[in-house]
Image (tube, rainbow, N blue to C red):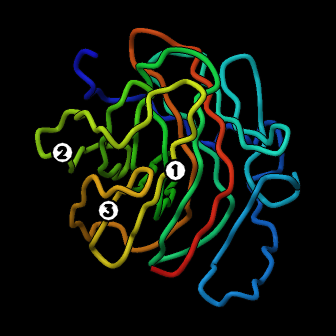
Amino acid sequence: MHCRFRHSLFLAACGIALVLTAACTPSRHPTYSDPNILFQDDFSQTTSGWDAYSDSEKTANYDNGQYLIAVEQTGVDVWGLPGLDLTNLRLEVDTHYADGPEDNEFGLMCRYTRDGDKHSFYFFFISSDGYYAMGKVVKNKRTVLNPTSGEYQPSDAINPDKSAVNRLRVTCAGKQMSLSINGAPVGEFEDNDLSHGDIGLIAGTLLNEGGVKIHFDNLVVRKP
């Protein structure tokens, strides 16, 4: 792997999807018997509120009981949102490499907000070849906050097998942000620039090769 840090051209899910679908209109989300659960989805129902769009260059859509993000362009991140507004949470999801270069990035977002064409959120990424990074995007400016070097770092917690499922867990509580991979804590940081917003699933390509496809499943959002 060479120089994992780079500035992506971020593609906004709702900004694109409005041309293709009305999926960005928030749906009514159910209540749960467990009071600690804020939201959950196994993607078996295509009416659960996530963005749903697809064309020759990008996809964020339901796919046979999972959620698929596919990115054909290079140097681009694509995401899907369910239309929530949350502050403090613990977010977990299963991730599975489906196709494309292993030199990729994918993971979770929290506290996503949008002001016109300016997007802000916290991101928590891993790659299929065993690297991780987390940080923030504030009005389209991306900053890696952990590792402090600003570059992706390797983690033995990531299972690099192409058939493996990597379970990600993110905690966003006040100014405390943390990432665990397959039950192993890998890093944390403090930041108070973003106070609330949507959650999201995200995947992207680096500058050298497109064609990334990532599946997500068994998402649960709990109180931290």
Q: Residue at x 50, y 26 (%)?
A: 161
Label 1: how many Cα within 10 Å (few below 14, some 14–19, many 20+): many
Q: CA distance from mark 2 to mark 1?
A: 20 Å
The amino acid marked with disc number 2 is Pro
Q: Earlier in the sequence, mark 3 or mark 1?
A: 1
User: What's the amino acid at mark 1?
Assistant: Arg
Q: Is residue 155 left or right of residue 29?
A: left
Q: Position of residue 116 (x, y in %)?
A: 53, 51
Q: 159 and 213: which one is in front?
A: 159
Who's the residue at 23% across and 66% down the image?
191
Label 3: which secondary element: strand
Q: Is label 3 or label 1 in front?
A: 1
The percent position of residue 43, horizontal first and vertical second, equals: 79, 52
Residue 125 or residue 167, whichever sits in front: 167
Which residue lies at the image location 76% right of the left edge and 88% below the top edge?
33
Q: Which mark is residue 167?
A: 1
Q: Residue at x 42, y 56 (%)?
A: 121
Name the quadrant containing residue 26: bottom right
Q: Is residue 32 left or right of residue 183?
A: right
What is the number of the mark on residue 147? 2
Q: Amino acid at mark 3?
A: Ser
- Numbered label attached to residue 178: 3
Secondary element at image label 2: loop
Task: Point out residue 84 in the picture as x, y percentages from the top left corner.
Answer: 63, 69
- Give the side of residue 29 with respect to residue 203, left or right: right
The N terminus, quarter of image = top left
Within 10 angstroms of label 3, few (less than 14), some, or many (20 or more) residues?
some
